[in-house]
């Protein structure tokens, strides 16, 4: 594989030389700025061999580098070994940015190429602005990879399907009407929606074009006068065609969206510069006023209606039952000594598949034993597949797609004897998790204002983690969604009632262990307080938190009460769905400490 990667980079350099290009930048996304992409758009993975979900490759005639974040430092280092691609650890103070490397490596008059469909307007403008002072040009090209990736997978062809109102809770017609009213309130005539989850949510359609993400490839144009879904017409069934017609949405060819935009006569159109690709933006009729603004859809999508909240509660019960059965099985299976990271991944999926309304995983399961747990987004392979032993920690991050909700849960499980360091780190992570779960805060609070609650126990010991503490969760949609977040980086979006967010602090020590505890939390009202309304979090996830690694003396009375109350609730809601053996195991796993 290493030689194959070298051959691909050399082929790209030859193509660049043929076109008089001095550098080529390859992001991880698709034309819709998706986090997870279909095989057709996995260009960065194909050229580098690195298969994490985030990263950017830069290739010049003299060097090749990959920038990725802390979740993937260890993984990227392993996968890039001997390929000639240098790892740049993004966001660290000593790491030069990609533009700094370009300005240092390229002489004035050079040309940096990008695929206009794979770069957002904001990314393109940022890169161009950074380089213009060095007399370095940025050029959009759309076919350079096709010239060298001769066996490139085709675009997805699976048809979308209607998402039943009994799960969605609000009709597509009502959503479209609300969006149009929002446009009116902003003084805007139309909007072009590129994000696949926003399109699926708005139209109450789902698909399977991207693994684990129930979305389909398309664009959605919404105005007061007309609405159009740009999609491969061959993918549209008669049922979906009739449904779209019933809500006055036209079907147009996906490949004709730029032609449509060149002729569009809207007086004004909203474009999200972070979510719209450059090629689409450049195709818009110049007589149309372009407004750079946020779409009204992400916030509306993130606030769950009563039907969605009821659905996620039911999905959590089914997911909790599957997790309980699995954890009970795991305890005996590890003792027998025949299980590996890959075998338990398959076993967990089989338990979930028994549940009603199950539609698949919400992301690829992360099962990292021992040192592999320190790789934040580790993915076991036949070569790395570790055998589980009756000692140390197993970090298990997994989730499911159910028709009535999406789940995402991480448990760090003691498989046997633990070191003092493992127990100390585990207890600190648990304290951080509980601190955030117990938070009460005034209306208008941002996630960045709460993030320190989860980090403080670790900060006090001189430790930290570099990923976010919480992300939004889709409703039978993408497992990662916005607009809210809980992280150190500032995000102006406040936490609203009905938002579902993750709570997942962690600690990662390379070569030793990784620890993360994750539940999903719902923002709920707690009543009026000084200067206004106050909110809190309801923990939605129903699964025992391993108590074998806890240093109980390190927990305050309030922390012990939270954990004991949580476990009482888990047992009460799951026991009726379990057989006697699983129920007895759960009784012991949720025993008061």
Image (cartoon, rainbow, N blue to C red):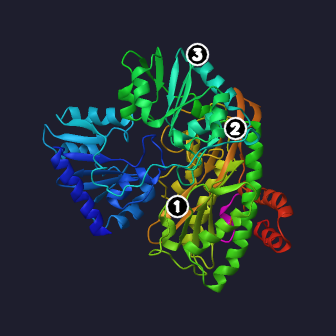
Along the line of sight, the residue nearer the viewer: 434 or 116: 116
Residue 22, image x, y percentages = 18, 45
- Neighbourhood count class around disc 2 (C-alpha, 10 Å): few under 14, some 14–19, many 20 upward: many
Q: Give the quarter of the figure containing the N terminus.
A: bottom left
Looking at the image, tell me whether mark 3 or mark 1 is earlier in sequence order.
3
Residue linked to disc 3:
184
Q: Main secondary structure of the magenta part?
A: loop
Verify CB contact (< 8 Å) between mark 1 and mark 2. no
Any magenta on residue 549? Answer: yes
Label 3: element kind: helix
Q: Residue at x 79, y 72 (%)?
A: 585
Alpha carbon separation for disc pair 3 and 2: 24 Å
State the image quarter where residue 103 is shown: top left
Left or right: 578 as drawn, with respect to 137? right
Q: Residue at x 16, y 49 (%)?
A: 17
Left or right: 479 as drawn, with respect to 99? right
Residue 172, image x, y percentages = 67, 31
Label 1: element kind: strand
Alpha carbon separation for disc pair 3 and 1: 47 Å
Along the line of sight, the residue nearer the viewer: 527 or 27: 27
State the image quarter where residue 592 is shown: bottom right
Along the line of sight, the residue nearer the viewer: 220 or 109: 220
Looking at the image, tell me whether mark 1 or mark 2 is earlier in sequence order.
2
Any magenta on residue 438? Answer: no
Q: From the viewer's perspective, is the residue at label 1 or at label 2 nearer? A: 2
Q: Which residues are magenta?
A: 547-557
Looking at the image, tell me whether mark 3 or mark 2 is earlier in sequence order.
3
Residue 68, image x, y percentages = 38, 53
Residue linked to disc 2:
304
């Amino acid at each position: 594989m290493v030689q194959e990667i070298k051959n691909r980079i050399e082929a790209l350099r030859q193509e660049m030389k043929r076109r008089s290009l001095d550098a080529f930048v390859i992001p991880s996304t698709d034309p819709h700025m998706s986090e997870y992409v279909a095989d057709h758009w996995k260009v960065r993975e194909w050229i580098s061999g690195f298969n994490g979900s985030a990263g950017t490759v830069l290739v010049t005639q003299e060097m090749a580098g990959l920038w990725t974040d802390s979740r993937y430092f260890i993984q990227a280092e392993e996968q890039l070994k001997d390929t000639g691609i240098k790892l740049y650890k993004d966001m660290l103070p000593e790491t030069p940015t990609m533009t700094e490397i370009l300005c240092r490596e390229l002489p004035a008059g050079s040309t940096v190429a990008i695929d206009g469909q794979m770069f957002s307007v904001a990314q393109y403008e940022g890169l161009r602005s950074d380089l213009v002072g060095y007399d370095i040009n940025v050029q959009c090209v759309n076919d350079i990879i096709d010239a060298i990736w001769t066996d490139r997978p085709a675009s997805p062809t699976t048809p979308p399907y209607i998402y039943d109102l009994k799960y969605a809770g609000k009709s597509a017609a009502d959503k479209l009407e609300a969006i149009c009213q929002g446009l009116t309130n902003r003084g805007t005539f139309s909007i072009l929606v590129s994000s696949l989850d926003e399109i699926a949510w708005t139209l109450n359609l789902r698909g399977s074009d991207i693994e684990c993400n129930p979305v389909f490839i398309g664009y959605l144009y919404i105005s007061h006068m007309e609405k159009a879904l740009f999609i491969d017409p061959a993918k549209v069934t008669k049922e979906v065609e009739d449904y779209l017609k019933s809500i006055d949405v036209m079907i147009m060819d996906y490949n004709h969206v730029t032609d449509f935009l060149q002729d569009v006569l809207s007086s004004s159109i909203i474009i999200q510069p972070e979510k719209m690709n450059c090629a689409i933006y450049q195709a818009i009729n110049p007589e149309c006023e372009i407004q750079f603004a946020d779409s009204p859809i992400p916030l509306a999508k993130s606030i769950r209606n009563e039907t969605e909240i009821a659905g996620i509660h039911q999905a959590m019960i089914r997911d909790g039952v599957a997790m309980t059965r699995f954890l009970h099985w795991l305890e005996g299976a590890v003792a027998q000594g025949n299980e590996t990271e890959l075998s338990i991944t398959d076993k967990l999926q089989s338990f979930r598949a028994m549940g009603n309304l199950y539609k698949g995983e919400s992301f690829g399961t992360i099962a990292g034993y021992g040192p592999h747990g320190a790789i934040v987004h580790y993915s076991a392979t036949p070569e790395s597949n570790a055998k589980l032993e009756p000692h140390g920690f197993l970090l298990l991050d997994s989730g499911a797609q159910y028709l009535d909700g999406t789940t995402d849960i991480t448990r760090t499980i003691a498989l046997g004897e633990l070191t003092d360091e493992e127990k100390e780190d585990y207890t600190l992570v648990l304290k951080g998790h509980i601190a955030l779960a117990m938070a009460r805060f005034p209306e208008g609070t941002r996630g960045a204002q709460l993030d320190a609650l989860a980090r403080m126990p670790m900060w006090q010991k001189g430790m930290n983690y570099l990923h976010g503490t919480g992300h939004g969760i889709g409703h039978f949609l993408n497992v990662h969604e916005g607009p809210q977040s809980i992280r150190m980086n500032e995000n102006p979006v406040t936490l609203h009632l009905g938002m579902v967010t993750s709570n997942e602090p962690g600690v990662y020590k390379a070569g030793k262990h990784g620890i993360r505890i994750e539940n999903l939390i719902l923002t709920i009202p707690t009543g009026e307080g000084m200067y206004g309304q106050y909110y809190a979090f309801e923990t939605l996830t129903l699964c025992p938190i391993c108590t074998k690694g806890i240093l109980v003396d390190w927990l305050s009375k309030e922390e012990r009460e939270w954990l004991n109350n949580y476990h009482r609730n888990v047992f009460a809601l799951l026991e009726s769905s379990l057989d006697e053996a699983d129920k007895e195991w759960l009784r012991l796993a949720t025993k008061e400490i």
